[in-house]
Image: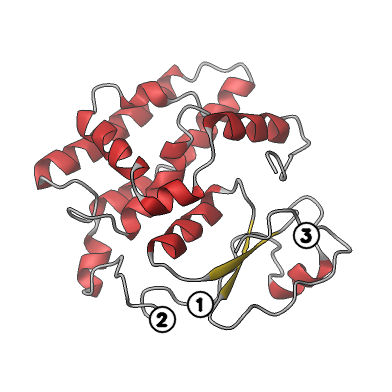
Amino acid sequence: MDEGFLFPSGSAAPGPVPKGYIKVYSMRFCLFAQRARLVLKAKGIKHEIINVHLADKPEWYLIKNPFGIVLTLETPLDEGYPEKQLLPSSPFAKAKNDAGVFFQSRIGYFYRISSGRKNGQDVSGLEAELKEKLSKLNEDLVKKKIKFFGGDSITMFDYMMWPWFERLEVFELQHCLDGTPEMKMWTERMLEDPAVKATIHSVDAHKAFFKSFVDGKPDYDYGL
């Protein structure tokens, strides 16, 4: 269930969630919130999405989350919904996923490059660094002979990385995958995943939202 339109300041708090559902406080174009939506879709968990107006937050949301950020999700996923495991059962194996940890610490490149380009800076050096980092992910797939970063089926690690790759063209960084054939195949496999298909936005929608965000007037309801 997706509420679609935003809940701004002054709006009434959403009603109770129907039995068997959980509530997800999100924003349609938020990369971090998309991670949770991917996992919920992949695990087949019934959920209600409440989109919060981040520039004009409703008062009731600040009570639920004093920081006023999304995502807010209170239900444990794998432990509470074991039907489709997205993480290894071993705590050691969870912590050992080099690719997931490696990528998480490199997310900043996407924003530094985008910001630098907007300010007229030379970002070629940062782009070269990002390309080198992505080539290491490519090597990880080759060395381990796996299709996804947790093995031969999609895991939490893949979903946690995907939102940034979905937006490569928006960040104008698709060329950073040049010379990484396994990474390109990984993106193609991800695009075939039902959870990805259910949560993806078109490149045009991403570009339109990103432009509105950069212009200081984010259109959270774009495309509705």
Task: Give x and y (percent) for residue 198.
Answer: 47, 51
Which residue appears farthest toward the bottom when viewing the image? 19
Can residue 128 be seen in this snapshot?
A: no
Circle 1 — which element? loop
The kind of residue tagged 3 is Phe
Circle 3 — which element? loop
Task: Give x and y (percent) for residue 84.
Answer: 31, 70
113 w.r.t. 158: above or below: above
Residue shown at the point (41%, 38%) measured from the top left:
165
144 w.r.t. 204: above or below: below
Can residue 107 be seen in this snapshot?
A: yes
- In the picture of the structure, the residue carrying the numbered disc 2 is 80
- In the picture of the structure, the residue carrying the numbered disc 3 is 7
Classify 10 Å Cα crowding around label 1: few (below 14), some (14-19), many (20 and above). Answer: few
C-alpha separation, residue under disc 1 versus residue under disc 2: 7 Å
Classify 10 Å Cα crowding around label 3: few (below 14), some (14-19), many (20 and above). Answer: many
Disc assigned to residue 203: none
Q: Quadrant of residue 17?
A: bottom right
Q: Give 49 or 88, whichever is nearer the viewer.
A: 49
The kind of residue tagged 1 is Thr
Q: Give 65 or 198, whichever is nearer the viewer.
A: 198
Quarter in which the N terminus is drawn: bottom right
Tell me whether the residue at label 1 lies in contact with that at label 2, contact meaning CB atoms closer than 8 angstroms: yes
Classify 10 Å Cα crowding around label 2: few (below 14), some (14-19), many (20 and above). Answer: few
Q: Quadrant of residue 195?
A: bottom left
Quarter in which the C terminus is drawn: top right
Sequence-first disc among 1 and 3: 3
Tell me whether the residue at label 3 lies in contact with that at label 2, contact meaning CB atoms closer than 8 angstroms: no
Task: Give x and y (percent) for residue 144.
Answer: 11, 47
Disc assigned to residue 75: 1
Circle 2 — which element? loop
